[in-house]
Every structure is written in structure tokens, then in C-alpha cells.
DNA sequence: CTGAAAGCGCTAACAC
DNA sequence: GTGTTAGCGCTTTCAG
């Protein structure tokens, strides 16, 4: 394919002209209907060559418009998430959305649901985001502060639900602020921890930074001094291992750890194990998120589930509400995350 | 929104007629440009009401066609996967695809990448799949045999790469058949297992059933009798637990287990633990897939990684090759999955 | 065997 | 303040 950039995109008219046939002939070749139309083999060949040579790229909008059946309404919906985010959260949202869509689909109303990704912090660079010609509605999640700022400034010209953070002017569904940070601190303190610590990644989403702050605040209020803060380069288990290795090597000590994501907790498990620290005997651990595997670790990991299920359950109706065209002002829905206390924080029984 | 089904979808012309204004006026209201156009507040209100009342749904194809900048080529790509499938594979594919797309994007060539889902075994029901007016190219993965049959019969009218199975007439990328099943059997036998077993779910993808068959064949050839087969209702850890509980309760015994997916292996860990069977002392366990957490289990899980990275690395260029319009016949690429031997099969050191 | 022409739904330029 | 008109790229009659 020649990517003849800079110049107008090639249309079937140019192909037709180039070959010396009509656009209709080209079209029939493109859709493999040249047999019915009894286009000569030679013409077909020449058309095919021209398509190659000129680097023809079909315009889907044109095709769709043309072949659109007038009785059908089509809704194009998407979940917008960052690449860097864990997919399971998105998976839940998708399932909930698709279930609703399946229920609402009729012969004359079709829905297309897709996941689209942007690079965290660079949502604004996503092409076409501000155009009203792509989606009827989206659910946006896993944004970073830079993305939130962008969204706050530029109202999207279609139905939008923001998941996990509060952005003025949008329908938002989020955790009760402070809940996770405060509750995780309490869980550790209740387990008898005297030296609690927290581990989190470098770049914080709004939700994560609120968790960190609330944890900090709660610990400080109850123990008069702040928790140790361990910062990992990324959110993968290996990042947590590296960060904890360094922390312990530098003489850091803790008897309780709040990991702001489950994958950090997984790395912490391994790190403590390598340093011969028992969970929960020497260190109690509590994580966040509802990673399906959390309960299958040894010992099972206590988590403050990220309330994803609940958030999604609120977000989907909110989206359809907007699609319905109702004109009320943006709403904000707060969700209380469930708390799962498991072996990793149950010291009484084991210590 | 009235979903006035059955009758033609509402267009701006109807809105215009209903209100008694021109289509352009309606359009300006829709795009919030009525201020520049100085539409009277009363008219705006009436238009808005009509939009609501008639249940207007904008036609994105029309909008896109109209607002298309003629110098821009747009490629619409998608990864098609089943809901029921584990998302990590999809995530890898998406990352690889997006990286390529980012590299190829220019001012005049844009790519849209989305993940779309179908219900496993019901790919054929996905609306618009056979129309040529949606995608320029797709990567299809996690299909069930019913889907494969459907695909084999109905050639998709756009560039397609099939991941993980072999379907005549398509570009395919898959594991070397038999490799995983054979090698996992060897791993268990090498660990000294005398009574190997296999656990898998009810419904099998092509890849999975090949794994099961090859495992069976290899064990039978080497030990003169087939492995015990444990069938779980689903692929979640809890399904594995239930199936293994039943197997052990019914007097079944094994000293080695091949779990065809990692999440089944996770459940197996828990089940053996509850039955006081040590891994790898009493039972060696080997899993499939490259779940990022496999190495963080206790003991670390040996896996025959599903070769996802390698498969994806082959699939993406194959897709762009087709987008380039080259006309050669479908190719098939075989990939050898990497083998990770970890604690769960290393008996020598522990037994 | 092939071409001409209409029109899918929408918006922007221009006209009044 | 609002209407008219042209045309985005494509496919499908219909007319040879």
C-alpha cells in the first residue's frame, strides 16, 4: 500500500477513473459481486491492481450510510479506559453494559459496545474524542488527574459517565471518598499493628490519592505519627518486591501493610516471604480491589473491594438515562465498597 | 425516549417538520451551535422537546461522512473476543496492536482500535459481523468450535487474523498443536508422577481440546493407562475446587495434575491444601497460560505459557499485511509456547 | 458486460 | 433569526 499521505484519500471514483470504468463497477469488485454483474475478468484484475496501487482505503462512514436500513437505530457505546489500568475492572463494566444492551436490543434497535483505550494522562490526545460523530455514549474510567482536568474543561458532546472520580459537570460514580483509606487503616490497627505502612505506585489516580491521604490521616490521628510510605515504580508485583526490598534493606520496619492495589499486595507477599516475615504473624496485609484471586492466596488476602461491581451497576443505568435524552443536571453517586476480612489480617487466631 | 420501534428511525428532517423549522436549525441545536446561528430561545426549546418526544437517535455514519476531512484515511480495527475468555490474552493483543498503530499513525492516517465481545459459541449472532461496513480489519480470538464452524463457512469481508486456532481460509496464528499437552505430560512424568490427572472445563476451545487429547495420548503411551479426567463446570477457581472435592471424595487419587488454565490451577491449589495434600510433595501441578501471578503462588506454579506474546507478535503484522491489500493466500503460523518450570513440579528438591 | 443517477443522514456555506 | 442547497463516499437500481 502506498500511503500517499498529504493528498486526499483515494475514493472509488479515482479508482474508476484510473482504470477507465464506472464507480459502480469498482464497487461491485470491492464487494465481490462482480460475478453477478458479469464484469470481465480483465476489468476485475485491472481494478484490483488500481486499488493496490493507489492505496485505496474504504470509507466506512460512506458504506454504512449507504447500506443503512432506515428502520434501524444504532447506538455506538464504548468504555474508555487507560492502557495502564488492570483489565478486570473494565471487564466488569463491559459485562454489565453488555447485559443491559442485550436486554434492550430489538429488531430495530441495535447497540455496538466496544472498549477503547487511551494512554493514561493523555486522554486529550485521543483522536476524535471531542467530535460528536463517533459515540452515542461512553463510560470513562481509570483516568489520571491530567485527564480529569482535560475533561473538566472540555465537555464531551455525548452521553458520558465517569467512573471512579468526581469531575464537575459529569455524571459520576465513585467510592465514598476516604472510606477505603480510613477503613484499611482501622483494619490494620484492629489487628494490633503498631507500625503500619502503605505501598502505592508513583502516579496516582484521584481514587488512589484519596486512599493514600485518608490512610495517612487516620493513622496519624490514632497513632500520633504517620505511616511509613513505600513508593513503587509501577503497579506490578515485581515493582512491589523491589520497593519493599529497598525499604527493608534501608532498615525500614512495619507490622502492617496497606497495598493500594491487589497486585502490589501480591508482590508484598513474596517480598515478606523472602525476608522470612510471616503474614499475618509478623506483618498484616490488606489490599484493595476485587481481584478474583485474592481469596486464593496463602493466607487469603483481606481486601477492601474496589466496589467495582457496585459502581458499574450504578453507571450503566446512568448512561442509558442520558441516552434517553433526559436533560437533568449531572448527578453523582457514591458507593460504599465491601470489606472482606480474610486470613492476612487475622492475627488473633494465629499469633 | 419513545422507542417507536417498527417505523423508520427519526431523522432531523422529521424533527424539523414536526417543529416547523429547517433541518439546519435542528442540526445547529444538536451541535450546540444555535448561539452562533442566533436561533431564538423558543425555537431551541421546541426543537429539544421534539428530539425527546420523537426519540431521535443521531446517525453516526451520516455525521461522520459529512464531517470527514477528505485528506484523512481512517482504519477501524477491532479485537473480537468472547466474554467468557480470560482478558489477559486480549490485553496483550491490544497492547501489541496499539503499539503498531501508534507507530503508523500520521496526520493523515488514523486508526481506531477497539475490543468487541461476543458470547462464546454465538459469534454468528453478532450483528453486523458479515457486513463490510464496520471494520477494516479484526483479530479474532477465544472462539469455540461452533464459532469456528461459522467462520469457516462465512468468509468475513475484511482483513482477519484468527488467534489460537486453525480455520481454513483464514490467516491463523496458533500454538504448535500437541506441544502443550505433550510437554505438560512429560513435565509431570519427569517429576516422578505415577498417577497423573487432568482438569479442564466443560466446553473446550480448539486449543484446549487439543491440549487435553495430547496429554491423554502422551500419558497413555508412557504409562499404559490414561490419566484421570476431572471436568469442572466452569473455568473459575471455585469450579476447580468443587470438581476436585468431588473427585477426591469419590476416592479418586492422583500425584500429578495438569490444569488446562491457570485459574483452574489456582482452585486446585486451594483444594489440595484443604485436603492436606502438599504441592509438589503429594501432588505436582502444572498449569497453562501466562497469568502474571503464576510465579507468585506458593509454591510458584509451573506453566506452559500460552505463547500469547509470541502469537500476538505474529498476528499484528499479519493483520497489517492484509490491510496493505496484498492478495496472497492465507498463511498459518505456528508458535512454540515457552515452558516455565517452577516450584510446583520440582519434587527432587523437596521430596 | 457496463454506466448513469439517486439518495442514505447530516452539516456548512451561503442566501435572505 | 432562519431556510436552501450542495455534497461527504458509497451502493443499488435501472437502463442500456
Image: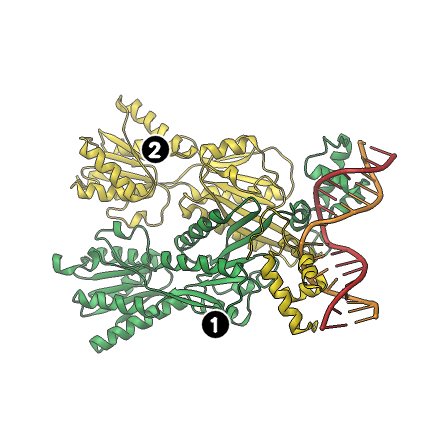
Chain colours: A green, B yellow, C orange, D red
**Around disc 1, counting alpha carbons within 10 Å, would you say few (fewer than 14), some (14 to 19), or many (20 or more)?**
some
- Label 2's element? helix
Residue A313 versus residue B324: which sits nearer the camera?
A: A313
Viewer can see residue B262 = yes
User: Looking at the picture, does residue B218 appear above or below residue A272?
Assistant: above
Residue A134, position as x, y percentages in the image? 59, 56
Question: Would you name the residue on which mark 1 appears?
Answer: A168
Secondary structure category for the residue under label 1: loop
Give the side of residue B186 with respect to residue A114, left or right. left
Q: Quadrant of residue A184?
A: bottom left
**Up-down: is B38 above or below A133?**
below
The answer, for residue B342, to whether it is visible in the render is: no
For label 2, count other residues whose C-alpha is less than 10 Å away and answer few (under 14), some (14-19) or many (20+).
some
* Circles 1 and 2 in contact, beta carbons < 8 Å: no
The residue lying at 40 percent from left, 38 percent from top is B337
Q: Chain of mark 2?
A: B
Residue B247: % across, % down: 22, 33
Occupied quadrant, residue A280: bottom left
Q: Who is closer to the viewer here, B284 or A164?
A: A164
| Quarter of the image that includes the C terminus of chain A | bottom left
Residue drawn at 41 percent across, 43 percent down? B85
Residue under numbered circle 2: B183
**How far is disc 1 from disc 2 in space, using C-alphas?**
56 Å
Amino acid at each position: 500500500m502506498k500511503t500517499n499521505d498529504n493528498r486526499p484519500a483515494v475514493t472509488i471514483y479515482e479508482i474508476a477513473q484510473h482504470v477507465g470504468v464506472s464507480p459502480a463497477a469498482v464497487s461491485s469488485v470491492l464487494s465481490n459481486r462482480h460475478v453477478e454483474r458479469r464484469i470481465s475478468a480483465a476489468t476485475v484484475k485491472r481494478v484490483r491492481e488500481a486499488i493496490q496501487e493507489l492505496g485505496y482505503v474504504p470509507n466506512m462512514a460512506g458504506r454504512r450510510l449507504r447500506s443503512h436500513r432506515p428502520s434501524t437505530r444504532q447506538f455506538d457505546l464504548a468504555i474508555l479506559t487507560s492502557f495502564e489500568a488492570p483489565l478486570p475492572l473494565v471487564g466488569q463494566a463491559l459485562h454489565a453494559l453488555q447485559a443491559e444492551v442485550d436486554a434492550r436490543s430489538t429488531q430495530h434497535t441495535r447497540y455496538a459496545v466496544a472498549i477503547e483505550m487511551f494512554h493514561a494522562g493523555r486522554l486529550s490526545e485521543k483522536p476524535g474524542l471531542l467530535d460528536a460523530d463517533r459515540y452515542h455514549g461512553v463510560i470513562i474510567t481509570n483516568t489520571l488527574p491530567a485527564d480529569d482536568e482535560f475533561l473538566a474543561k472540555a465537555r464531551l458532546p455525548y452521553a458520558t459517565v465517569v467512573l471512579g472520580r468526581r469531575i464537575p459537570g459529569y455524571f459520576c460514580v465513585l467510592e465514598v471518598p476516604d472510606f477505603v483509606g480510613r477503613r484499611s487503616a482501622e483494619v490494620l490497627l484492629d489487628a494490633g499493628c503498631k507500625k503500619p505502612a502503605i505501598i502505592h505506585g508513583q502516579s496516582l489516580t484521584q481514587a488512589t490519592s484519596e486512599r493514600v491521604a485518608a490512610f495517612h490521616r487516620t493513622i496519624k490521628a490514632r497513632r500520633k505519627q504517620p505511616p511509613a510510605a513505600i513508593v513503587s515504580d509501577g503497579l506490578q508485583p515485581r515493582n512491589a518486591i523491589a520497593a519493599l526490598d529497598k525499604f527493608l534493606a534501608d532498615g525500614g520496619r512495619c507490622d502492617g501493610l496497606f497495598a493500594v492495589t491487589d497486585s502490589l499486595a501480591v508482590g508484598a507477599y513474596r517480598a515478606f516471604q523472602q525476608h522470612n516475615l510471616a503474614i499475618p504473624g509478623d506483618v498484616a496485609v490488606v489490599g484493595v480491589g476485587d481481584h478474583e484471586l485474592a481469596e486464593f492466596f496463602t493466607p487469603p488476602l483481606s481486601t477492601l473491594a474496589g466496589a467495582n461491581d457496585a459502581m458499574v451497576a450504578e453507571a450503566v443505568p446512568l448512561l442509558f438515562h442520558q441516552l434517553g435524552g433526559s436533560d437533568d443536571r449531572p448527578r453523582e453517586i457514591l458507593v460504599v465498597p465491601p470489606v472482606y476480612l480474610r486470613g492476612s489480617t487475622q492475627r488473633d487466631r494465629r499469633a
